[in-house]
Image (tube, rainbow, N blue to C red):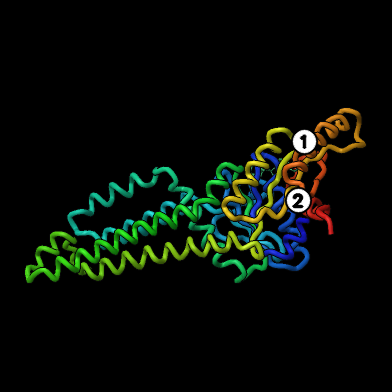
Amino acid sequence: MLLDLARTRRILFFGGKGGVGKTTVSAALALRCADEGRPVLLVSTDPAHNLGHLFECDIGPEPRRIAPNLDVLELDPERTVDAHLAEVGAALRRLMPERLAGEVDRHMALSRDAPGMQEAALLERIAEVVAGAGNAHQLVIFDTAPSGHTARLMALPEMMAAWTEGLLARREQADRFGDIVRRMGSDTSVSDKLFGDSPVDGPRDRNARIRHLLHRRRQRFADLREALSDASRTAFVIVLAAERLPVRETIAFHAQLERAGIDVGGLVVNKRSPADAGEFLAQRRRQEQGYLDELDRELGDVARLEIPLGPGDVVGLAAVRALGGSLGE
Ligand SMILES: Nc1ncnc2c1ncn2[C@@H]1O[C@H](COP(=O)(O)OP(=O)(O)OP(=O)(O)O)[C@@H](O)[C@H]1O
Ligand SMILES: [Mg+2]
């Protein structure tokens, strides 16, 4: 199932509850596809990154080649927020009248910790990666943070687009108003008082520039939205353990993703207890079966793959490769 998805889609997201094996399974699939000769980019969107621990090396916000055909990167929301605020701050300072520079700086400093700022920054980076998908890589795999976070993130392009839309509408209203004021008379100082006194840009340039920035941003989110909801390009894989809460959460998560228009291509039931390793694990396996029956009733039509519980943690390239080998044909 995973290999089918990887062969037919260009973008895969892995999500699910904390600790179920999202990083391990997405990395195993990425390495397996890379070993088969396809260039793969594996991207962690989790602020508590663990691809570095898994592959036992330092991974940063720039793609790093860790095996033939396999590049890995960890998106860094802090750094993205800093870069974003620096860019917006510089643009605002240029666009606003000189006397408001202090105001702009205060606003930017407050924005750093505003709710949703990191998510918005993360989403911009995801949008960039998705926009570039297909340039150097045939497949891009996102390893995401535990479900609550990711579900919000997946609904965000919509919200960001609506927000940008609102700003644009206000902007255009202001432009029309500005035109009227300017036409009203020869006294240009009236419009200067209203629209600032930037030494760099006249009000018209300034408005055009703001509109351009907003349009670009709106386009970026619209492109991401389109990529996410295009089932021929993108699929979401939910990883879970066959336990009560992960199963319930998977059902809810699946519904959330559907509402966001995202195709759930498959479910991976990880760490399945073996039937032939003693009565203790056999009993656990029977209990797991009860939860999987519930999954069958609710999501019986979604493709499913089971991965057995291994004897130890999966760490290092060789162990990840071995797991990749067990993902089927
Ligand atoms: N099939 C398996 N058998 C044995 N151990 C496994 C298996 N899959 C994952 N693990 C182990 O479970 C732990 C959690 O895995 P992983 O880090 O991939 O989960 P995660 O869902 O990415 O966690 P987080 O939500 O913290 O990002 C790791 O120590 C990993 O080695
Ligand atoms: Mg992880």
Q: Which secondary structure lies at badge 1?
A: helix
Q: From the image, which quarter does the N terminus lie in?
A: bottom right
Check the image and report above or below for 59 versus 9: above
Q: Which mark is residue 26?
A: none
Is residue 232 among the parts visible in the rendering? yes
Residue at label 2? 301
Where's residue 262, x and y in %?
Answer: 61, 55
Check the image and report above or below for 293 versus 24: above
- Label 2 C-beta lies within 8 Å of the nearest ligand 1 atom: no
The 10 Å Cα crowd at callout 1, few under 14, some 14 to 19, many 20 or more, is some
Where's residue 73, x and y in %?
Answer: 59, 56
- Label 1 C-beta lies within 8 Å of the nearest ligand 1 atom: no
Q: Which secondary structure lies at badge 2?
A: loop
- What residue lies at 66% left-to-right and 65% top-to-bottom? 232
**Could you give the CA–CA distance between mark 2 and mark 1, rounded to whole angstroms?**
16 Å
**Quick one: 134 or 319, which is closer to the camera?**
134
Kind of residue at disc 2: Asp
